[in-house]
Image: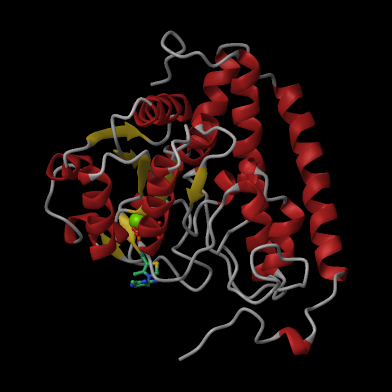
Amino acid sequence: MFDLQNTDLTKEDLKQMFYSMLLGRRLDERLWLLNRSGQLPFVISCQGQEATQIGMAFALKEGDISAPYYRDLAFITHLGITPLETMMSAFAKEGDTSSGGKQMPSHFSKKSLGIMTQGSCVATQILHAVGASLAFKMDGKNQVAIATLGEGSSNQGDFHEGLNFAGVHQLPFICVIENNDYAISVHSSLQYAAKKLSDRAIGYGITGVQVDGNNPIAVYEVVKAARERAIRGEGATLIEAMTTRLTPHSSDDDDQYRTEDERANNKEKDCLLLFKNFLITKDILTEKLIEEMETNIKSIIDDATNQAKAAKYPEISECLTHVYGG
Ligand SMILES: Cc1ncc(C[n+]2csc(CCOP(=O)(O)OP(=O)(O)O)c2C)c(N)n1
Ligand SMILES: [Mg+2]
């Protein structure tokens, strides 16, 4: 399933890809441990979607704008939101760079990294990112805006409006659907009747591509090609990455709507294990190197956890800063 012939990724890049996927996974796992031991109120996971997220992160360039969704922990960590900042957000501490400890966790944003602020209503980020791509076009900048969302969210009106507008104006915009087959408990067979969501691109007059979301190299290649088309003035791309959600929807979901068999089969589709085995077969990774990565990552996550636990909560007087109400 992995193809090294048609990629410009070097062995070092592939190692770095694996490291970023591993960091995302271990950080996510730590958040669950903290939740299950009663220390954190809420977790929503990237587990199973790291290959898609790191593939697309590798294809972006400095100055691009991204509007991620709540599952994109591996993506935003690779872009530069640190594990410490993630922990500050999870513990609702003042040092949370997304909201100063006020927003729910996983509403990622950081201005200096071009990561737009996001709301909780799914698919609204499409409109924001399309707006950013319009600004890039008007300013004559060689940059793209990228938005991600789940397949369930792609049935919202905002998705249609955003992609239609991007198609009409040939904007440098990339939309990545992380299709994990579920919208909370609702299976994709009850979400849409289309064979492929990427086919919706035809209706917007843009390019549509479906890709194996368990393969970071393939995702990198399609996002890189989409970026190059956008920079050449050839408009937007809709990418549908087929992934697997390895956890329940969130820490408040018990996942009982999936059978034991389905959950067991999902483990065989774990992108981290598939990529690891491939890189070992190709002598790009060794068990020793993976051990070193694990040790390094554990120490980064331990430090982030301890520092965030010890950090200050925001002042009560800050409660309504940047909060708007009708
Ligand atoms: C407009 C809107 N409707 C409903 C919700 C509640 N909600 C949050 S996540 C979610 C499921 C989204 O599923 P999908 O888009 O497939 O993303 P996934 O969680 O599977 O990655 C829903 C219904 C919401 N946040 N916003
Ligand atoms: Mg989904």
> Residue 279 appears in which quarter of the rendering?
top right
* Colour pattern: secondary structure
Closest to the observer, 298 or 201: 201
Q: Residue furthest top?
A: 5
Closest to the observer, 318 or 84: 318
Q: Where does residue 180 sit, x and y in percent of width and height?
A: 35, 50
Please tell me in which quarter of the rendered image ligand 2 is found: bottom left
Q: Where does residue 101 sit, x and y in percent of width and height?
A: 69, 73
Q: How many marks?
A: 0
> Residue 168 appears in which quarter of the rendering?
top left
Q: Where does residue 198 sit, x and y in percent of width and height?
A: 23, 40
Closest to the observer, 145 or 12: 145
Residue 34 shows in this picture: yes
Question: Which residue is located at x 88 percent, y 70 percent?
Answer: 310
Q: Is residue 177 above or below residue 90?
A: above
Question: Which residue is located at x 28 percent, y 46 percent?
Answer: 166
Question: Which residue is located at x 32 percent, y 41 percent?
Answer: 171
Question: Which residue is located at x 77 percent, y 72 percent?
Answer: 94
Residue 259 shows in this picture: no
> Residue 123 appears in which quarter of the rendering?
bottom left
Q: Is residue 49 above or below residue 131?
A: above
Q: Is residue 321 above or below residue 230?
A: below
**Residue 233 placement, left or right of 51:** left
**Quarter of the figure that contains the C terminus:** bottom left
Q: Residue furthest front?
A: 139
Q: Where does residue 107 sit, x and y in percent of width and height?
A: 55, 64
Closest to the observer, 204 or 182: 204
